[in-house]
Image: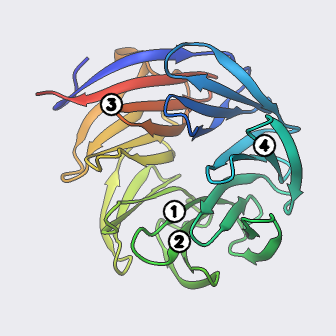
């Protein structure tokens, strides 16, 4: 089916999870990725077929996944605050990191500085040494959940979305908060953050169903867009930086033109055989968009421009 200047094809509808899916992560293999779900399963999928394989079984809901490609390790963050360290050579757990008691909603890795970041549901950020997984520090950034982190592509900074609607700016490699601004209305959590590859723009999505666009230079607000009907859970730039995808509790995925921020397509269940419930996570794999949500399904879409 066609959107505005793009063509969309649903390639795969992958099933097997028995609960909502909250996390997606690329493998080092360009055709493979992982999904993590509410029943504690981490599944491995291949874009070349519809068969999923069990990689790991966690002791709680899997909210976050992060590949440490230079170490061949997959980190699995779960609802009880633990993070499983999975050795991908053996597909076995090397250790369990327990720096939090609240859910670990997001894991980020800065390979240059060898720093791992765990964002937790109690508003704390833990900073972990990437070489030996030693805890370096824990910062209390909010009284509410921390859900998202993005690295600034041209400065030694990262931005963290907080449950009170603010965004904290953190310096690297000395991890300390250097700035904070109210990105959305108070108590409307910042669920997702994405930075443009050139560092010019920062996008945030919130429980208020808006996408806000900020300057990458001084974090001043450029534009606010009523993007969905309900909370926005993920924002993802295509590798070409020409398309942005957003996922929402309103059961839809929207594709946006980066330059104009006009909607190119609205992927819903009725017109595109999309998700029947909340869409929680997005993952671009070249020109394929992977999506997952509360309907226990992983969908693989092919997105390409119309000549």
Residue indicated by mark 4: 87
Disc 2 element: strand
Q: Where is residue 100 in the image (x, y as percent from the top left)?
A: 84, 61
Residue closer to the observer: 183 or 301: 301
The residue sitting at 43% across, 38% down in the picture is 284
Q: Would you call the spot at circle 2 few (<14 residues within 10 Å), some (14-19), or many (20 or more)?
A: some
Circle nearer the N terminus (1, 4): 4
Residue indicated by mark 1: 150
Q: Position of residue 66 (x, y in %)?
A: 65, 49
Contact between labelled residues 1 and 2, with CB atoms less than 8 Å apart:
yes
Q: Position of residue 38 (x, y in %)?
A: 75, 32
Quadrant (top left/top right/bottom left/bottom right) for the N terminus: top left
Quadrant (top left/top right/bottom left/bottom right) for the C terminus: top left
Could one spot residue 223 in this view of the protein?
yes
* Vertical arrangement, residue 249 with respect to residue 165, above or below: above
Could one spot residue 248 in this view of the protein?
no
* Vertical arrangement, residue 98 with respect to residue 160, above or below: above
Disc 3 element: strand
* Vertical arrangement, residue 68 with respect to residue 59, above or below: below
Q: Position of residue 34 (x, y in %)?
A: 63, 33
Disc 1 element: strand
Residue most extreme to the left: 307
Disc 4 element: strand
The residue sitting at 40% across, 24% down in the picture is 301
State how far apart marks 3 and 4 are (Cα): 38 Å
- Is label 2 or label 3 in front? 2
Residue indicated by mark 2: 158
Disc ID at residue 266 = 3
Circle nearer the N terminus (1, 3): 1
State how far apart marks 1 and 3 are (Cα): 25 Å
């Amino acid at each position: 089916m066609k959107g505005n200047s793009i063509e969309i094809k649903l390639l795969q509808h992958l099933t097997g999870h028995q609960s909502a899916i909250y996390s997606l992560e690329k493998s080092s293999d360009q055709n493979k990725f992982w999904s993590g779900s509410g029943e504690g399963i981490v599944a491995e999928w291949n874009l070349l077929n519809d068969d999923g394989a069990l990689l790991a079984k966690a002791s709680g809901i899997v909210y976050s996944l992060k590949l440490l490609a230079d170490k061949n390790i997959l980190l699995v963050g779960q609802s009880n605050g633990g993070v499983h360290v999975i050795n991908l050579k053996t597909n076995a757990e090397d250790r369990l990191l327990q720096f939090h008691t609240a859910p670990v909603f997001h894991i980020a890795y800065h390979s240059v500085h060898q720093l791992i970041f765990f964002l937790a549901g109690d508003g704390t950020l833990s900073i972990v040494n990437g070489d030996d997984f030693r805890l370096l520090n824990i910062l209390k950034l909010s009284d509410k959940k921390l859900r998202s982190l993005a690295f600034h592509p041209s400065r030694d900074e990262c931005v963290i979305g907080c449950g009170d609607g603010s965004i904290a700016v953190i310096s690297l490699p000395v991890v300390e908060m250097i700035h904070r601004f109210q990105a959305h209305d108070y108590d409307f959590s910042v669920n997702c953050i994405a930075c443009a590859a050139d560092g010019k723009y920062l996008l945030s999505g919130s429980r208020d169903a808006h996408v806000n666009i900020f300057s990458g230079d001084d974090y001043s607000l450029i534009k606010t867009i009523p993007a969905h009907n309900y909370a926005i859970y993920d924002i993802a730039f295509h590798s070409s930086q020409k398309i942005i995808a957003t996922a929402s509790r309103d059961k839809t995925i929207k594709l946006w033109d980066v330059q104009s921020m006009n909607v190119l397509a609205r992927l819903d269940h009725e017109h595109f055989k999309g998700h029947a419930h909340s869409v929680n996570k997005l993952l671009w794999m070249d020109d394929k968009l992977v999506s997952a949500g509360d309907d226990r399904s992983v969908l693989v879409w092919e997105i390409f421009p119309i000549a």
